[in-house]
Image (spheres, rainbow, N blue to C red):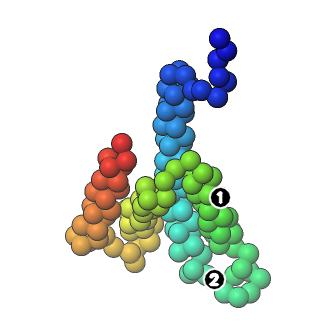
């Protein structure tokens, strides 16, 4: 009696299920890391905006260059994460960047503020991201 090489065994099924979970976790980690980089990019671009001009000095300031670089890295990480993750889960996770910016911005820029309404918005984002994560499992 010969064994069909294409017939999956229970071990194969368990390993593929475990691999699927590991890949999903990797995608979530990549998106959350990308979210932090996106937040840093937004804060750097805000910083660069105060001295931005269409001159050599204005275009080649370190905050602007780093902000644009972080935007590019964020896009690359998101594309890699999308290989093994669901867009309906991963894209809303990028919304955590709004949380990081809302918290850091008033600390770094005195003209920015964090009031009750903004805190309610941040809370809504956190609840939404949590709900999406729970709905996936």
| Residue at point 33%, 62% (across, down) | 125
| Residue 131 shown left or right of residue 42 in the figure | left
Can you say which quadrant of the picture contains the N terminus?
A: top right
Asked whether residue 31 is in view, the answer is: yes
The part of the image, by quadrant, that contains residue 77 is bottom right
Q: Identify the residue at image location x=57%, y=80%.
A: 49
Given contact means CB atoms under 8 Å apart, are the residues at marks 1 and 2 in contact? no
The crowd level at tag 2 (other Cα within 10 Å; few <14, some 14-19, many 20+) is some
Rendered image: mark on residue 101: none
> Which of the 4 image quadrants contains residue 41?
bottom right
Query: Residue 6, position in %: x, y?
Result: 64, 28
Is there any visible trace of residue 66 in the rendered image? no
Q: Position of residue 37 (x, y in %)?
A: 55, 58
Up the image or down, 132 lies above or below 20; here it is below
**Is disc 1 surrounded by few (<14), some (14 to 19) or many (20+) residues within 10 Å?**
few
Is 66 placed above or below 113 here? above
Q: Secondary structure at mark 2?
A: loop
**Is 14 placed above or below 61 here?**
above
Q: How many marks?
A: 2
Whichever of callouts 1 and 2 sits on the residue coming sooner in the sequence is 2
Q: Which residue is situated farthest in the top direction here?
A: 1
Q: CA distance from mark 1 to mark 2?
A: 26 Å
Circle number at residue 52: 2
Residue located at (38% from left, 66% from top): 102
Q: Is residue 66 rendered to the left or right of residue 87?
A: right
Task: Classify mark 1: helix, strand or loop.
Answer: helix
Which quarter of the picture shows residue 68? Answer: bottom right
Q: Name the foreground residue: 103 vs 92.
A: 92
Q: Measuring from the top left, give residue 42's x and y in whole percent.
A: 53, 69
**Screen quadrant of the C terminus:** top left
Mark 1 or mark 2: which is in front? 1
Where is mark 1, residue-wise?
Answer: 76
């Amino acid at each position: 009696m010969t064994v069909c090489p294409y017939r999956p065994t229970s071990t194969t099924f368990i390993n593929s299920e475990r691999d699927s979970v590991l890949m999903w976790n990797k995608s979530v980690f990549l998106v959350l890391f990308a979210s932090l980089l996106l937040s840093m990019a937004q804060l750097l671009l805000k910083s660069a905006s105060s001295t931005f001009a269409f001159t050599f000095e204005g275009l080649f300031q370190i905050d602007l260059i780093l902000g644009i670089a972080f935007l590019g890295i964020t896009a690359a990480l998101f594309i890699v994460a999308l290989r093994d993750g669901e867009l309906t889960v991963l894209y809303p996770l990028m919304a955590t960047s709004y949380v990081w910016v809302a918290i850091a911005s008033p600390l770094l820029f005195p003209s920015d503020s964090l009031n009750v309404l903004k805190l309610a918005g941040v809370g809504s984002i956190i609840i939404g991201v949590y709900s999406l994560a729970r709905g996936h499992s």
